[in-house]
Amino acid sequence: MTKIFAHENTEIGDSKITCAELHMDDGACISDYCTLRGKGSVYIGTYAQIEPYVALMTTVASPMGHMSDMMKDESRRRTRTDDIIIEDHAFIGMHSTIMPGVVIGEGAVVGAYSYITQNVPAWTVSHQPKGKPKVSRRRIDDGVDIKPITGVGFKRYRANQDTEEL
């Protein structure tokens, strides 16, 4: 049975969760039809978004030899179990698979249909099938000068009435 530790404003859609523990910070979201599976834990940071049909696999089996031999003899089966960490403001695109021990860095984006076997650094975009970071991106507060918009008038429209300046 999964232990779920969720902060305020978290959302879990219609997903299958069978990992050992699930930790969700404020505003974290797991969309519908996701799978969180294995004997490890999953940590999801503040406002991280996991799109539909994502698989977070904290345990994977690696057979040694023929599959029928592995089913008969447990000693021939090797498994790898490790936690998955998805840091704050990360985004994981739909139909992606994240393997055990992976850390998705703060603000990182994992593109749809990605297969992630290694860590994704903070503020990068990874969209290749093998999950290697491809593009860096900047935080909005890293040297970007955001000026307020001035001189723009807004009008309120009401049915069957004249417009009114705001």
Image: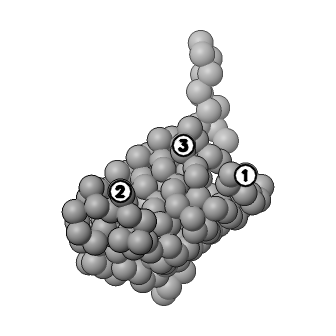
Q: Amino acid at mark 3?
A: Ser
> Mark 2 sits on what residue?
71
Quote the CA–CA distance across marks 2 and 1: 43 Å
Q: Residue furthest top?
A: 160
Q: Residue at x 63, y 58 (%)?
A: 28
- State yes or no: discs 3 and 2 in contact (Cβ < 8 Å): no
Q: Secondary structure at mark 2?
A: helix
- Note whether residue 123 is visible: no
Q: Amino acid at mark 2?
A: Met
Q: Secondary structure at mark 3?
A: loop
User: Is 26 drawn above or below residue 160 in the view shown?
Assistant: below
Quote the CA–CA distance across marks 1 and 3: 17 Å
> Mark 3 sits on what residue?
15
Q: Residue at x 59, y 58 (%)?
A: 19
Q: Is residue 13 left or right of residue 91?
A: right
Q: Residue furthest bottom?
A: 143
| Front disc: 3 or 2 | 2
User: Is 98 drawn above or below residue 30 in the view shown?
Assistant: below
Q: In the rendered image, which quarter is residue 137 located in? A: bottom left
Q: Residue furthest right?
A: 8
Residue 133 at what x, y percent from top left? 30, 79
Q: How busy is the neighbourhood of tag 1: few (under 14 within 10 Å), some, or many (20 plus)?
A: few
Q: Amino acid at mark 1?
A: Asn
Q: Which dot marks residue 9? A: 1
- State yes or no: discs 1 and 3 in contact (Cβ < 8 Å): no
Q: In the rendered image, which quarter is residue 23 located in? A: bottom right
Q: Is residue 41 left or right of residue 139?
A: right
Q: Which dot marks residue 161? A: none
Earlier residue among tags 3 and 2: 3
Q: Residue at x 47, y 77 (%)?
A: 101
